[in-house]
Image (spheres, grey):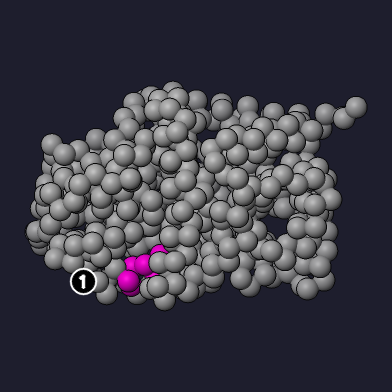
Amino acid sequence: VNGGISFWYADDGLPAAREPLTSDATADVCVVGGGYTGLWTAYYLKKAAPFLRITVLEQKFCGYGASGRNGGWLYNGIAGRDRYAKLHGHEAAVRLQQAMNATVGEVIRTASEESVEADIHQGGVLEVAYTPAQLARLKSFHETELSYGEKDRTLLGARETAERIRVAGAVGSTWTPHGARLHPVKLVKGLARAVEALGVTIHESTPVTEIKPKHAVTPYGTVRAPYILRCTEGFTASLKGQRRTWLPMNSSMIATEPLTPAQWESIGWEGRETLGDMAHAYMYALRTADDRIALGGRGIPYRYGSRTDNDGRTQAATIDALHTILTRFFPQLAGVRVAHAWSGVLGVPRDWCATVTLDRATGLGWAGGYVGSGVATANLAARTLRDLVQQDSGQAGPTDLTTLPWVNHKVRKWEPEPFRWLGVHGMYATYNAADHRERTTPTT
């Protein structure tokens, strides 16, 4: 199957449609976007203040975007941490990292509390190196993570790496317990159900065309609310005036047919860690609950004019490239069939820093720019938006979350076309060339 939104939807089925907005409406808080960020924000706000009238507007259906297409990595990475360290000091960035570490457990705890069965398995994150240059980067990366307070991270040699997952040619790895595998669609469906059960109104098939103070404008009516929270991530460019705010970066995935017990015996992976590497154009993979390998990376990184894909359909060359990565890691799987391929977009700010903001003068808020680390970061962003709204409305004071360095961070816009297309494609051409050179340069 190619496209069809994602393998996760093929596996779990499309959700039943919710009613669209049919006329003008009012709310206390209007959330634009029915993915992880929007749903978690509605969830935490409603739990904190049950009297709030909250409306979620979604252009297609909840989880149609990256929340239903991602690689299933619930982990502690956050985009922009090093820049925040330069801007606000190392200790501020350490607090941000500690909040991300705790967020992995928060998602797992809340999913259990709300009876959301999302195939979650906390096996941690294993990132491997298979060239000398990658090994040098891995060791540097490992030391950097330790400097941000991650004392439970482990550096592994070739033999110890193979005891976990037998990646061909792996010369080392780093492992952190702050990560888990999950089924993205099962999580987003369960979260939407939990939000509705709290009394939040969700309107699907309701595209928002413009956001302005106290107004979310759709073709079917306008929702008026003191707070309008934009949670649209990679689809932000479709909103009026937002074309250059966040670049919709394309990421693609494949899922294999289920592997046999003998094939798993040859690979290992009994701990079901999420798996990544130290390439410049990195890959990410996991072992699914039904014993497939789902693996992703960059295909066509960006479409001219900030366009997004058509229901996840993926070019044949990208599928072949991802299959090549699969067989480079596991040569014994050369004959394994690719059962599904799909693509989606993620939001990339000009400085590659995730942000969460509430403009107290206008009531407009937003969160995103996760650069591919959104499964966990969306949860932290949502809890932060909750605290910012409560602080602004006088329901609460500042919290540990509202003082994190990514709050109210300002980012300049992307360049106009064709410069942003040339820049992004040039960057990834450089990455791919560097990776090829590292793989083919003989070691001495």
Residue at numbered disc 1: 199
In-front residue for pair 71/158: 158
Q: Residue at x 19, y 55 (%)?
A: 30
Does 30 sit left or right of 173 as displayed? left
In-front residue for pair 296/155: 155
- Mark 1 is surrounded, within 10 Å at the Cα level, by few (under 14), some (14 to 19) or many (20 or more) other residues, namely some
Dividing the picture into quarters, in which one does residue 115 lie?
bottom left
Residue sticking out furthest to the right? 444
Q: Residue 361's spot in the image, x, y percent?
A: 13, 36
What secondary structure characterizes most of the magenta part? helix
Tell me the SS state at disc 1.
Answer: loop
Whether 240 is drawn above or below 159: the answer is above
Residue 246 appears anywhere in the view: no
Q: Residue 16's spot in the image, x, y percent?
A: 35, 74
Q: Residue 95's spot in the image, x, y percent?
A: 43, 41
Asked if the stretch drawn in magenta spans residue 189, the answer is yes
Q: Which residues are magenta?
A: 187-194
Whether 360 is drawn above or below 423: the answer is below
In-front residue for pair 188/403: 403
Q: Residue at x 57, y 35 (%)?
A: 147
